[in-house]
Amino acid sequence: MSLFSLNHISKSFGGVQALSDLSFELEEGEIFSVIGPNGAGKSTIFNCISGLYTPDEGSIQLAEKEITGWAPHRIARAGIARTFQNLELFRYLTAVDNLLLGRHIHMQASLLRILAMPFRRSRAAREEIAHRHKVEEIIEFLELEAYRDRPVFALPYGIQKLLELGRALALEPKILLLDEPAAGLNNEERQDMIFWIKDIRDQLGVTVIVIEHNMELVKDISDRVLALNFGRMIATGQVLEVLEHEEVRKAYLGEIPETT
């Protein structure tokens, strides 16, 4: 049984066909990368999965449960978290506060219980302690201790990228969607990101889908790759197999296959 599947998904915007009859399955514990030129439909896949868009056709299933058309908060509760191409952090909150926002789907205390929080034995106080404990685990995992109490606007860009990754992990997802995690990073930061993505899969047991343009990162982390162009699948399979595919080389890598 696959953990996740996209089944014949299509999505258009006016006369633009962003996705056309796209299908793939995801096994638990995979790192699955999606590649393609700008405008190929990669982010549209993530927006359909996370509930920002509703597909025109097709279905999306998580552990054989239909989640097509669910609201984003409901999909997050089901176990799917994501990051964005452009950082979506709260710039004037601290790193800790941004991570705590990722715990919102697990917060259950009512307003009356929250008002009783000053009492240490209250349910809201116990819940707050548990959430902060989880956040401290993420800080330790991503080695963010030096930045925990600093406002986001004062943090280097690479640390902000890592913080957004941590906030997604705070949801305790089954599947993590990473939208261009290496964008804007220098070589050292990119190598660190490779390290974190592998550890998220290996140590935390989270299945990962990655959209990425950096082929070195894709080669290093991916179990399988899907290549898109104009919303259609060109090829899918093992990394080198896909990157050597004639249509992928023409459409994405900018190469013209040799003729004999």
Image: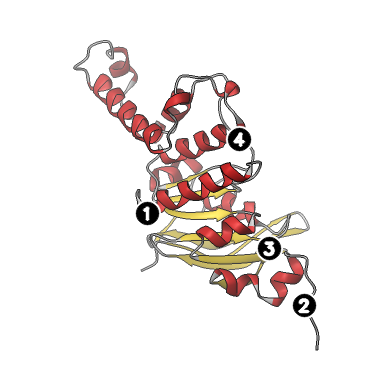
Residue sitting at the far front: 188
- The image shows residue 7, relative to residue 205, as above or below, that is below
Dot 2 or dot 3: first in sequence order is: 3
Q: Where is residue 32 in the image (x, y as percent from the top left)?
A: 51, 61
| Secondary structure of residue under mark 3 | loop
Residue 54: in sight, yes or no?
no
Q: Name the residue under label 4.
A: 87
| Secondary structure of residue under mark 2 | loop
Q: Does 28 sit left or right of 70 as displayed?
A: left
Tags 3 and 1 touching, CB below 8 Å: no
Judged by depth in the image, the label closer to the viewer, 3 or 1, is: 1
Judged by depth in the image, the label closer to the viewer, 3 or 4, is: 4
Classify 10 Å Cα crowding around label 3: few (below 14), some (14-19), many (20 and above).
many
Q: Distance between the residues labelled 3 and 1?
A: 31 Å
Residue in front for this viewpoint, 200 or 70: 200
Residue in front for this viewpoint, 30 or 55: 30
Disc 4 marks a residue whose amino acid type is Leu
Residue sitting at the far top: 118
- Residue at the image position 64 percent from the left and 54 percent from the top: 214
Q: Mark 2 points at which residue?
A: 257
Dot 1 or dot 2: first in sequence order is: 1
- Residue at the image position 60 percent from the left and 35 percent from the top: 87
Residue 18: in sight, yes or no?
yes
Picture quadrant where residue 235 is located: bottom right
Q: Name the residue under label 1.
A: 202
Q: Distance between the residues labelled 3 and 4?
A: 25 Å
Q: Does 162 sit left or right of 14 as displayed?
A: left
Disc 1 marks a residue whose amino acid type is Asp
Disc 2 marks a residue whose amino acid type is Pro
Please tell me the numbered disc located at residue 231. Answer: 3
Q: How far apart are marks 1 and 4 (CA)?
A: 25 Å
